[in-house]
Amino acid sequence: METAPCESPSSMAMDARQPRLFLGCRSKVMAVMNADTGQVIPTPVPASVRIFPAQ
């Protein structure tokens, strides 16, 4: 599975409602992937961004 621009994924979180996978990467980016299709959403998110669940 292609995860570019994410090199060496090291952590993962899932938003089941969207459905999205958030991949934390050793290349210091966080890639967002469509969990149904496996397609990486093209805009990388800096690894320092924190995402909090909806209340």
Image (cartoon, grey):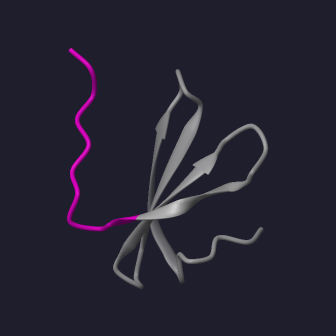
Residue at 79%, 44% (x, y): give it.
37
The part of the chain drawn in magenta is 45-55
Residue at 73%, 54% (x, y): give it.
39
Residue at 21%, 50% (x, y): give it.
50
Q: How many marks?
A: 0
Q: Compared to 34, does 29 lie above or below?
A: below
Q: Compared to 14, does 29 lie above or below?
A: below
Relative placement, left or right, of 27 versus 21 is left
Q: Position of residue 28 (x, y in %)?
A: 34, 80
Q: Residue furthest top?
A: 55
Residue 27 is one of the magenta-drawn residues: no
Residue at 75%, 37% (x, y): give it.
36
Q: Position of residue 32 (x, y in %)?
A: 52, 54
In front of the other: 30 or 11 = 30
In front of the other: 12 or 30 = 30
Residue 54 is one of the magenta-drawn residues: yes
